[in-house]
Amino acid sequence: MTAMLPVAVLREWQMLSTAAFYDMTSADDRWRSSADLGQLFEALIDKLKPDIFVEAGAFDGKTSLNMKRRHPAIRAVAFEANPHNHAHFEAELKHGRAGVEYLNLAVSNATGQTSFKVLKHLHGKELPRRNLRSSLLARNEEGVTYEDVSVEAVSLDGFFGDLGEKRCAAWIDVEGAIGLALEGAQSFLANTHLLMVEVEETEFWQGQWQAPKVVRFLAEHNLVPIARDFESHEQFNYVFVRSGRLADAKVKNCVINYLSRCAHPKPAAAG
């Protein structure tokens, strides 16, 4: 058992206490928990100053555009597998002009052509092809139909190769395919100082890794969870930091400010 696993498990239980800052029956408060976590992630980017930022499951790539604006020297790479999303937002937002690499690629555990499942119908409703809910994996329920499209897949290890001393940060939100993304990122993770991932407690997608397995895997790569949101009981986001940065005063101050903001939200502006 890796030395980081007990630390990661303890941190996971400690993070549950931050639910006290939110009303779990309120959709607005659940949204606020996600917004607070996103602000923590951005603050840590500002302090840790990574050389590379990766957004896997980027949809419109706006997070990468924001990172590039905040940190012009950063290499921002946004991966979006859904060709309908990519074609629309590449034309609309023109990421290349801003210096962002916005790529129609799936992040997986190997390089080559693969089938990507664009959702067509879910829960009896037709969905637009441009959506946030498509995946490399099939959903674990009946009554779902897909448009299967062939896309190019890459592993983060294969795409970035030897990173040397470069420091990386990543946000991975790939609709259940987190296991595939992490399996193909073992060298990349050795250079990763900050990571945000969407996880699930329930197997919504066939063969997906659930939250405990993600935590165990990342602990083996010296990444420890420091905060989470409460998007829902079964799906939420973690922020992980490299274990060697836990004693960093800059990291501690970011977490202090995050917890203070959670406990003392600013009132909504009038009008």
Image (cartoon, rainbow, N blue to C red):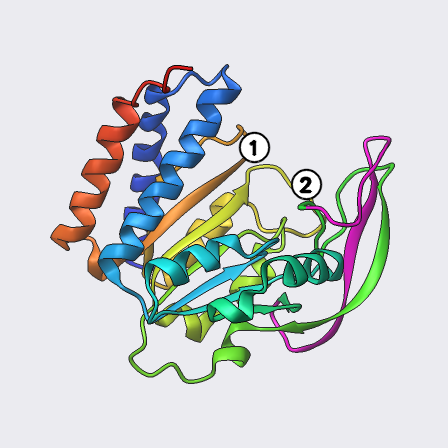
Tag 2 residue: 204
Q: Position of residue 26 (x, y in %)?
A: 49, 16
Decide if residue 90 is on the left or right side of residue 36: right
- Compared with residue 70, is residue 261 higher up or lower down, i.e. above or below? above
Tag 1 residue: 234
Say if mark 1 contacts mark 2, CB within 8 Å.
yes
Residue 83: which quarter of the image? bottom right
The answer to whether residue 225 of the structure is visible from this angle is no
- Compared with residue 89, is residue 271 higher up or lower down, i.e. above or below? above
Decide if residue 144 is on the left or right side of residue 214: right
* Amino acid type at image mark 2: Phe
The residue shown at (27%, 56%) is 46
- The span picked out in magenta is 108-131
Decide if residue 200 is on the left or right side of residue 153: left
The residue shown at (55%, 51%) is 173
Q: Position of residue 267 (x, y in %)?
A: 32, 18
* Amino acid type at image mark 1: Glu
Residue 257: which quarter of the image? top left
The residue shown at (50%, 50%) is 213
Given the current orientation, which residue lies at the most extreme left position? Answer: 249
